[in-house]
Amino acid sequence: YFSSSALLRANSGEPPKFQPPPKPVIIDKSKVVVERRFLSPEFIPPRGRKDPLKYYIERIDMIRRRKVLNIPEFYVGSILSVTTADPYASDKTSRFVGICIQRGGKGLGATFVLRNVIEGQGVEFCYEIYNPRIQEIKVLKLEKRLDDNLMYLRDALTEYSTFDVNMKPVPYSPNDEIPVNQLKVKMKPKPWSKRWERPYFNIQGIHFELPEEIMEEAQKLSQPWIKFDMLREYNTSELEKKIWNEVNEKLKK
Amino acid sequence: MRLSLAAAIYHGRVHRRLGLGPRSRLDMLRNLVTALVRHERIEAPWARADEMRFYAERLIDYGKRGDADEQAMRMADFWLTEKDLIHKLFKLLAPRFQSYSGNYTRLLQIPNRENLDRAKMAVIEYKGNPFPPLIVVHRDNEKTLLNQLLKGYREDILKTRATQVPEEAPASLYTGTAV
């Protein structure tokens, strides 16, 4: 490694003057919390002719619920554990761990679907985020995948959907960027529930081993003009900023 | 999101169905947009002009981003089939509409087409074009009796104001020049 005293010796024949090493600058990142602007997708109202008052009222209720229950930031592809109230269980709670394959709905009806394979049987649970029966949502592993919708895991090999029910939460600091898992999933033999090779689904996360004729047939159905159709664009950046400010102010109170 | 929907559009859908299919519709609108950028005022069937209006305005928004923006260049390259118009869009139309925030076009209905189909026609133009204006504001003829009487009444009032003002000058706050 670089030693400053060696340079001093090289400059002149005299014995080097003692220079104390530079003091290390400690940046304590655990204390400096970089505020990452994550607005949950259910806050952003969809395109339409509905009165924005409806979404405003829903947002007030959503913020009231969030003050009681901490709903963490998560994405499609992260592994969550959810405990809900169950009147027929012995300890009145039921816990489910799974990978989030889909986040749907806007406003108070927003849902997320968790998938896991338990004792060889694939199980999917669709939870409503603002359901008062939910007692705890914990993120065991926060990560993103290559797609927004992992419904193809139903037709993938079961090893890709099995997650240990008692897995330990993976530590994660709020300063890091969310890791994107570049995993390409191997599928069971066809037939599948949907034709995932078609460009309509725009799936990046499958390792296709289909013959080339089928892939070419699928590409014939691609519509390359859609990305130039300006009417389909929905720019939410300004809306997001306003809603972010509004939500943050209310949550801090 | 358009607030005025034709009867053929239902359940909140915003695309009209023109031509042979979605690709044909886009190609047709692309031709119309190219013609509009070239001539700055065109006549077309009302439905096509109404559909084209949104794309023409969005194209100007992309043009305002500047030609250094890759996405803007790709859009302009797709929408303008005649490539000399790309230069016109970025260098002429975008600076012209810098002060406007929206509504760069004007759509006005025209008498129906003379053909057998009697189609509902419209003229669509970019604002600020060099042609004479489409809506000419006509002032009433000054030589009619009523207008002559009103003109005389107006002149009388101004005269009386001019004579009254020097009398009231020390008392009033009015310090303007006499007419």
Image (cartoon, grey):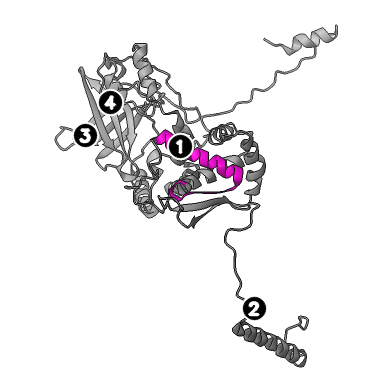
Of residues A10 and A159, the one drawn nearer to the viewer in this rendering: A159
Q: Are marks 4 and 2 in contact (CB under 8 Å)?
A: no
How many residues crowd around disc 3 within 10 Å: few (fewer than 14), some, or many (20 or more)? Answer: some
Count the numbered circles shown.
4
Using the numbered discs, state the Cα–Cα distance from disc 3 to disc 2 in whole angstroms: 88 Å
Q: Where A43 falls versus A116 (above or below)? A: below
Of all chains, the one bearing label 4 is A
Report the magenta residues as a range: B22-48
* Residue B104 appears in the picture as rendered: no
Of all chains, the one bearing label 1 is B
The amino acid at mark 2 is Glu
- Disc number for residue A93: 3
- Disc number for residue A115: 4
Q: Are marks 4 and 3 in contact (CB under 8 Å)?
A: no
The amino acid at mark 3 is Thr
Magenta stretch encompasses residue B37: yes
Using the numbered discs, state the Cα–Cα distance from disc 4 to disc 3 in whole angstroms: 19 Å
